[in-house]
Image (cartoon, grey):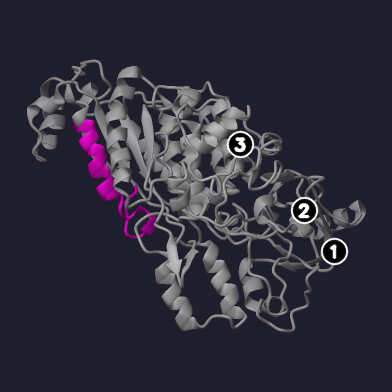
């Protein structure tokens, strides 16, 4: 084992201090049973864990942390575990996205304030991964991500069922009488049958893959199921690797380059990933000073086919994806077609090309080859512009109905998701299959927090008539497990004075995804008149975190981060008060 003792390490400003200060730092640590020899200058590795029983996707991370510790000890480091908040989408109200920035702030400040030389980030649910990456990037100490892994495939009556995706399907079946309440109650246990995050290609799986594509997670580690022993092997390997990264001074700023972000965007298209990746990647890029605009997400994916046949766009689940070769097989396929940069360095210390050189595609039905893709090039996320979304909107083409990608229909406007849900089952609701459902005031400032409400269920009367999809337009987000022809992240949002606030019932809405436009067919003079009549909604919050959020959150096209958190603040050792 290499001797890694170094009196110049950041942690030695605490543990190597002389006199009273050093005694205080070391003696209180020793009440946990640490011997004096662990303060000899070896790398001190923080293990940031979002384990919480209030975030079911993250509940098992305490066990993952134990595996990381083994690796750190093996490599000659000192592992110190610490908790962070957990932003679990499944329980938090009004939305976990409201707290992503708060978690990122907490992670950043905990890393900076403590005697750490490097950090392993343990995340699970979809907001915890970007929050931890954002916080760690702002400090810029060596860091490696370990996501908690997906659940095992759901099983119900002989078929695979996917978390999230089948929630929407079962809801439709319940509304149309194809399923009873008792059957739904039984099915929910079949859908979530192990620890882990969503096993569909929802946002949690997407962001795990994105972290790997960025180079911040060990190759292949995004896909191992949470309860597979190899998830723990991966965590142990990450513990060993972070000690070497400290020695090499391999920091996020060296990994999170413009080329790395381009790779992540293209990988997201190839895996049929979540639209939420747009917001999270944009926010992360802002933390490291990489220029990443909304149009990059359209331009970079036009040549990229969808290779992965996973729900909600396809048929399979993350367990199948793992056994089929996982993300390295996808990246190798893209590299072979000249669609990825092979040169960016990763947490392994090797390049993307080196990491994927031996990757193998085992099942070509789950991970399709580039020359026979699951869906053709240009079916990834599309960025729309027009008088209804001057700063942009997005749509996930692979999860939409092809016949609705060009559509003109009358708007039926709802001022909140709750207003729609209150009448969605009304048999007299004035809608038909051509109607464009508009949900507004669901953006970052307006809700607040930009919840996953855009893919509202279809009106019950249309479901019973056999209608399976409609165009929906919203300034909120959609779960990565969701599907349908849904235009998301309309920017500026309605509460910020965006044109969505001016739409009225019956206005013709024109969607042209091939032409990349979304517009309201109402003349400019009429829209100007309506704007004169519009008044911004009253401020609902005057104190607390939610007030801070509504005052400082940026629009969706800038990642919905706080403006004052853009850029890094470094890892300078805080002053000693002892």
Q: Quadrant of the N terminus?
A: top left
Image side of residue 74 versus residue 280, left or right: left
**Magenta residues, start to end:** 50-73
Q: Position of residue 233 (x, y in %)?
A: 29, 40
Image side of residue 360 versus residue 112, left or right: right
- Secondary structure predominantly adopted by residues drawn in magenta: helix
Q: Gap between marks 3 and 2, in whole Å?
A: 30 Å
Marker disc for residue 507: 1
Residue 560 seen in the figure: no
Q: Residues within 10 Å of mark 3 (few under 14, many from 20)?
A: many
The local secondary structure at tag 1 comes to: loop
Badge 3 is on which residue?
Answer: 266
Of circles 1 and 3, the one toward us is 3
- Measuring 70% from the left and 39% from the top, which residue is drawn there? 298
Image side of residue 523 versus residue 547, left or right: right
Q: Position of residue 221 (x, y in %)?
A: 40, 40
The local secondary structure at tag 2 comes to: helix
Q: Residues within 10 Å of mark 2 (few under 14, many from 20)?
A: many
- Measuring 43% from the left and 63% from the top, which residue is drawn there? 154
Marker disc for residue 138: none
User: Mark 2 or 1 closer to N-term?
Assistant: 2
Q: Is 197 situated above or below 299?
A: below
Residue 140 seen in the figure: yes
Q: Is 510 situated above or below 30?
A: below
Residue 325 is inside the magenta segment: no
User: Mark 3 or 2 closer to N-term?
Assistant: 3
Badge 2 is on which residue?
Answer: 499
Q: Gap between marks 1 and 3, in whole Å?
A: 36 Å
User: Mark 1 or 3 closer to N-term?
Assistant: 3
Q: Quadrant of the C terminus?
A: top left
């Amino acid at each position: 084992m290499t001797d890694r003792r170094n009196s110049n390490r950041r942690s030695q400003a605490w543990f190597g201090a002389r006199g009273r200060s050093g005694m205080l730092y070391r003696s209180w640590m020793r009440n946990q049973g640490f011997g004096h020899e662990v303060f000899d200058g070896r790398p001190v590795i923080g293990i940031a864990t979002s384990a919480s029983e209030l975030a079911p996707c993250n509940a098992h991370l305490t066990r993952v942390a134990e595996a990381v510790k083994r690796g750190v000890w093996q490599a000659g480091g000192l592992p110190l575990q610490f908790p962070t908040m957990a932003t679990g989408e499944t329980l938090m109200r009004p939305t976990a996205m409201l707290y992503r920035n708060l978690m990122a702030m907490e992670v950043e400040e905990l890393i900076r304030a403590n005697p750490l030389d490097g950090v392993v980030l343990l995340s699970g649910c979809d907001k915890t991964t970007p929050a931890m990456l954002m916080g760690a990037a702002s400090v810029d100490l060596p860091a490696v991500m370990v996501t908690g892994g997906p659940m095992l495939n759901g099983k119900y009556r002989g078929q695979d069922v996917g978390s999230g995706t089948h929630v929407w399907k079962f809801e439709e079946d319940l509304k149309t009488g194809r399923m009873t309440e008792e059957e739904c109650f039984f099915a929910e246990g079949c859908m979530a049958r192990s620890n882990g995050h969503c096993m569909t290609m929802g946002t949690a799986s997407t962001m795990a893959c994105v972290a790997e594509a960025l180079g911040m997670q060990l190759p292949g580690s995004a896909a191992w199921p949470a309860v597979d022993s190899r998830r723990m092997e991966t965590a142990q390997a990450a513990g060993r690797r972070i000690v070497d990264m400290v020695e090499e001074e391999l920091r996020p700023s060296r990994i999170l380059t413009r080329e790395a972000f381009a790779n992540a965007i293209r990988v997201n298209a190839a895996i049929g990933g979540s639209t939420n990746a747009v917001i999270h990647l944009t926010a992360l890029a802002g933390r490291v000073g990489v220029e990443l605009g909304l149009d990059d997400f359209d331009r970079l994916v036009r040549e990229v086919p969808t290779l992965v046949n996973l729900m909600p766009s396809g048929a399979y689940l993350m367990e199948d994806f793992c056994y089929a070769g996982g993300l390295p097989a996808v990246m190798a396929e893209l590299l072979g077609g000249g669609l990825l940069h092979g040169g960016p360095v990763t947490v392994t210390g090797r390049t993307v090309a080196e990491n994927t050189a031996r990757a193998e595609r085992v099942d070509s039905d789950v991970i399709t080859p580039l020359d026979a893709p699951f869906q053709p090039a240009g079916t990834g996320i599309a960025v729309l512009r027009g008088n209804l979304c001057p700063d942009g909107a997005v749509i996930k083409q692979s999860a939409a109905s092809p016949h609705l990608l060009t559509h003109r229909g009358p708007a039926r406007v709802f001022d909140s998701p709750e207003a729609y849900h209150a009448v969605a089952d009304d048999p007299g609701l004035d809608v038909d299959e051509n109607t464009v459902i508009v949900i507004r005031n669901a953006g970052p400032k307006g809700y607040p927090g930009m919840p996953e409400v855009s893919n509202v269920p279809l009106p019950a009367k249309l479901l019973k008539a056999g209608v399976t999809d409609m165009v929906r337009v919203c300034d909120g987000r959609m779960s990565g497990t969701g599907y349908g022809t849904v235009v998301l992240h309309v920017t500026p949002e309605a509460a910020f004075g965006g044109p969505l606030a001016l739409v009225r019932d019956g206005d013709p809405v024109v969607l042209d995804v091939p032409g990349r436009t979304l517009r309201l067919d109402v003349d400019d003079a009429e829209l100007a008149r309506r704007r004169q009549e519009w008044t911004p909604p009253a401020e609902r919050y005057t104190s607390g975190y939610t007030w801070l959020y509504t005052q400082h959150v940026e629009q969706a096209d800038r990642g919905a981060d706080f403006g004052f958190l853009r850029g890094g603040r470094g890892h300078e050792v805080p002053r000693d008060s002892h």
